[in-house]
Image (tube, rainbow, N blue to C red):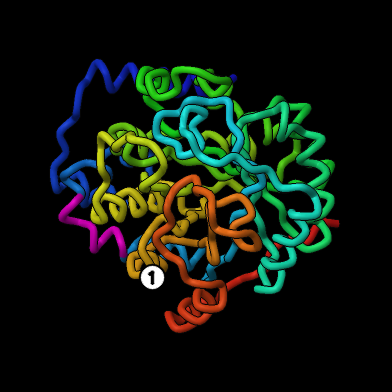
Amino acid sequence: MSFYETYQTFRQILEQAGKASHGPDQIQRILQQSTLKPWDLYALLSPAAAPFLEQMAQKAHRLTVQHFGRTILLYTPLYLSNYCTNFCRYCGFNAENPIPRKQLSPAEVEKEAQAIAETGLKHILILTGDARQLAGLDYLKSCIAVLRRYFTSIGIEIYALETGEYRELIAAGVDSLTIYQETYDESLYQELHPQGPKKDYCFRLDAPERACRSGIRSVNIAALLGLGDWRTDAFFTGLHADYLQRTFPEVEVGLSLPRMRAHAGAYQPLYPVKDAVLVQIMLALRLYLPRAGIALSTREQAGLRDNLIRLGVTKMSAGSTTRVGGRTQAHDDVGQFEIADERSVAEMQARIQGLGYQPVFKDWQPI
């Protein structure tokens, strides 16, 4: 059993039925329900739901406080390597992009870790490009060994792995996985990934399941908004998360809402996502998945991030950089993409508190 079977079933229904029309009475009924079904989610992502964003926001706020309290977990990304063998058209690390390539040594990783640890953060997300010959499992485990001295939670956002490989990294100290499907549109996915190991749609789609079977504590999934039709990608993100929650109830399942940002290369998003659309996506997903965490990164502007805290967000990055060694080395290289919210961890902490929420630096301690 795989989510791919669920994906195919719903994709065929969408292709046969076309874009269904929804009315205000249907949206009102959905908002009165305590639990939602997949087609309710699709309706809340439709144009008919746009006039109901205020009602959706009020319910999303209540559900988030009920399940998570007034808390925001803080984390930060750490880029270990930008070498890559993929040719993803939308990514600054694309193998064709003539950018300076760099990979941190364990000693350099420790300097970055020390700089991050000084901010008080205990949750970290490590990222690499897809270049197994350089950033393979042995390299990753050597970095994790360093990071365990500074952080209680180590997440990975790297290339898709086999089940046994996830087990190796979990044994080394990893407890969470973040992986974006990029787009759930299978044909578009092939166009966007013309060469490289990432070209295998199903291998990437099934990566969260392999990690769950390996004993991972937490999994975070997403589509990169702007690549494909946002309504379809948000719908399948919700279905994917729901599938993971039901199949692996012991795993903490979360979502991210990343929008395309400026990056090295000429690719421009085909389906730009406006702020109001991002809000609608987040609210619809919160109502459909009240127990799922929702992460909002520094891809978004500070003001927008502040406003979304009350509407369903449970996790935010802070003090971010998308450059390899971006905290302790000269800034002469190129990041994966440009960030929009450059506030420090201390600034984020103060702002979250000012909004009546509690910033959380640590919510997990390995045994």
Question: Going by the image, does 344 lie left or right of 27?
Answer: right
**Residue found 71% across the figure and 47% down from its top:** 104
Q: Nearer the viewer, residue 224 or 54?
A: 224
Q: Position of residue 260 (x, y in %)?
A: 36, 44
- Residue 35 visible in the picture: no
Q: Position of residue 359 (x, y in %)?
A: 56, 74
Q: Nearer the viewer, residue 120 or 83?
A: 83
Query: Please, what secondary structure does the residue beneath circle 1 have?
Result: helix
**Residue found 61% across the figure and 31% down from its top:** 130
Displayed quadrant of residue 45: top left
Q: Is residue 135 above or below residue 361?
A: above
- Residue 6 visible in the picture: yes
Label count reads: 1
Mark 1 Cα-neighbour bin, 10 Å: few <14, some 14–19, many ≥20:
some
Question: Going by the image, does 183 lie left or right of 156?
Answer: left
**Residue found 25% across the figure and 42% down from its top:** 272
Work out which quarter of the rendered image holds the C terminus and state it: bottom right
Which residue has dot 1 on it? Answer: 306
Residue 187: in magenta span: no
What type is the residue that disc 1 sits on?
Asp
Q: Nearer the viewer, residue 164 or 145?
A: 145
**Residue found 45% across the figure and 59% down from its top:** 298
Q: Nearer the viewer, residue 315 or 145?
A: 145
In the rendered structure, which segment of residues is drawn in magenta?
50-57
Q: Main secondary structure of the magenta part?
A: helix
Work out which quarter of the rendered image holds the N terminus and state it: top right
Q: Position of residue 63 (x, y in %)?
A: 43, 62
Q: Position of residue 13 (x, y in %)?
A: 30, 19
